[in-house]
Image (tube, rainbow, N blue to C red):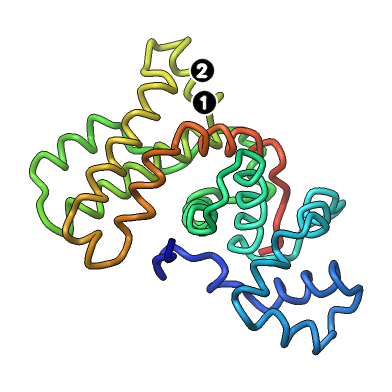
Amino acid sequence: MEVPLFCTCTGRFEERDFLFLASVITGDQSDRAFRRFVLEREELLLVLDDERVLRAILDFCTVLNVSPWFYFYVLVRHSLKRSSLEEVALAEYLGAVLAERVPVGPFDALKGIPSGFVHSVDFLAILDQATGETRYELLVAAGNQFLVLTGIFPDYIRQREERYGAPGLAYYEGFARSSFHQASDCPVARSRGTSEVLDTLMQVLPEARRSLNRLADSLVFLAS
């Protein structure tokens, strides 16, 4: 599956990511041969699948100096692989969504309280009037938001359900799947090359969500 450029993580890696990767794989941040090796996308993806990279992130004892794009791609990719979801495009997409929507830093001690949450009824009210590119963008935004909510902040949803009778995980997961399905059918998705990844995400969303649940407790502080 081809990865849409707008949702790639690996294309946004920074210099500090490659230094970290070299230190993990070769023990030498300045290893020029390794840097040339990972210039090729296929070789980079192969290295990122190495369990040593995941372990280095999870076992790091201080603030981790890598970009959010690198950090979330590695966590998501390895978690998805454990669920037999092998499509790199899914890891690229989900990693990018988390990098953009999940701040990882000291203030995350607010413990599972997502910011910028838009209620589903508000999305529905806007979508009812939206057409064309605006509708596509809203559908993707809705799918992304509720995927993050159910994947990274499931306790927040459960607490709202218990205390206020708010919708539960199944409702928001269904909303996300419907949003991705509708977005994948939009002409805008076909023109941007995102139809396939959105449709695949809709189909595997329950397992993808559970994969995100498993990695949520692994989040650590990143350097700014």
- Which is more toward the observer, 92 or 196? 196
Give coordinates of residue 223: x percent, y percent: 71, 62
In percent of the image, x 33 and y 47: which residue is there?
Answer: 199
Q: Answer with the quarter of the image where residue 84 lies.
A: top right
Total numbered badges shown on the rendered structure: 2
The image quadrant that residue 172 belongs to is top left
Q: What residue sits 72% from the left and 41% below the top? A: 218
The quadrant the N terminus occupies is bottom left
Residue 141 sits above or below residue 173 on the image = below
Which residue is at 60% across, 33% downward?
213
Q: Mark 2, residues whose alpha carbon is within 10 Å: few (<14), some, or many (≥20)?
A: few
* Residue 91 vertical placement versus 108 (above, below): below
Amino acid type shown at disc 2: Gln
Residue sticking out furthest to the right: 27
Q: Position of residue 185 (x, y in %)?
A: 20, 50
Q: Does residue 76 appear left or right of residue 191 in this picture?
A: right
Mark carried by residue 159? 2
Pointer 1 and pointer 2: residues touching (CB < 8 Å)? yes
The amino acid beneath tag 1 is Tyr
* Label of residue 156 in the image: 1
Task: Tell me the SS state at disc 1.
Answer: helix
Q: Position of residue 9 (x, y in %)?
A: 54, 65
Quarter of the image containing the C terminus? bottom right
Q: Position of residue 212 (x, y in %)?
A: 58, 39
* Mark-to-mark CA distance, 1 and 2: 5 Å
Label 1, residues with CA under 10 Å away: few <14, some 14-19, many ≥20:
some
Q: Quadrant of residue 27?
A: bottom right
Vertically, is 102 above or below 113? below
